[in-house]
Amino acid sequence: MSNLKTHQRLHTGECPFSCSVCNMSYSRLSSLHVHQHHVHNDERSYACDVCEKAFALERDVKIHFKRMHSEVRPFRCDVCNKIFAIQIDLKRHKTIHTEEQLYHCDVCNMSFRYLKTLKDHMFRHNNDYPYPCDLCGKDLNSQSALTEHKRVHTGERPYVCNVCDKSFNKKSALKIHQRIHTGERPYVCNVCDKSFTHSGSLKCHQRFHTGERPYICDVCSQSFRMKYTLIAHQVSHTGECLFVCDACHRSYKWRTSLIKHISSSCVQRL
């Protein structure tokens, strides 16, 4: 009976087991225990034999080894032929092609590909951000989010491209960048078949087909397909120079003007 009740929570979305530290909730008590040991336990006694990265759980070392170091990748995407070491990674990857949004927010009806993304989103409704940054006071919803945020202050860029040595402060940014070298463009428009390296680029592109212009100027009500176009437009009302050269500190209203300055006329860079 208990197994049935646990299973039914997959359909109801009930998560009765909450973490006392960060209020993340789970449908199973065992999942809560894993979370507490994995996220809130500073002790990481299981190290990878290859790269020495340490983990709190032995199972995480095994998963890490399969993902990062094993040459055995038996799970192949039937759309783009990309291969994976772990079946759940293939399942997540396939949502790129289907645009399937499996997880839905009961509060605002937004939908997400991943359960973790939905859980992170729910913090916005609960106003529950238990991890404050000691440098700027910003509150984050997890220790990992705080660690990532602090790189804005420290300038740390630990994720390095093994092809061109360009570095990034987020692993996801490195992954997107590497598609420049691999040529992978997994996000395909279902109208014209144009492909993109990033899901956000596809979403912006699709607005050319739908006519959607969600970004509206609060001064003149002109609408735009992309947020950066709205920001550039608003300069015409404010006169503000948003784009500043890091070398000589000259400022410009338009990003194109800053790029031209950097590439041709900045004395500090010559």
Image: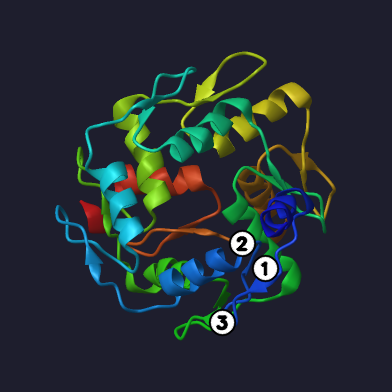
The quadrant in which residue 140 appears is: bottom right
| CB-based contact (under 8 Å), mark 1 and mark 2 | yes
Q: Which residue is mark 3?
A: 21
Residue 194, position as x, y percentages in the image: 55, 18
For the residue marked with disc 3, what is the amino acid? Val
Q: Nearer the viewer, mark 2 or mark 3?
A: 3
Relative side of 199 to 174, left or right: right
Q: Please give the name of the residue rendered at 35% of the width and 57% of the height, measured from the top-left corner.
A: 60
Q: Tell me if mark 2 has few (under 14), some (14-19) or many (20+) residues whose alpha carbon lies within 10 angstroms of its own.
A: some
Q: Tell me if mark 1 has few (under 14), some (14-19) or many (20+) residues whose alpha carbon lies within 10 angstroms of its own.
A: some
Tell me, yes or no, if residue 56 can be seen here. Answer: yes
For the residue marked with disc 2, what is the amino acid? Asp
Q: Which residue is mark 1?
A: 123
Q: Give the CA separation, mark 3 to mark 1.
A: 14 Å
Q: Nearer the viewer, mark 3 or mark 1?
A: 3
Relative side of 215 to 40, left or right: right
Q: Tell me if mark 3 has few (under 14), some (14-19) or many (20+) residues whose alpha carbon lies within 10 angstroms of its own.
A: few
Relative side of 59 to 141, left or right: left
**Element type at mark 2:** helix
Image quarter in which the N terminus is found? bottom right
The label number, if any, that marks residue 120 in the structure image = 2
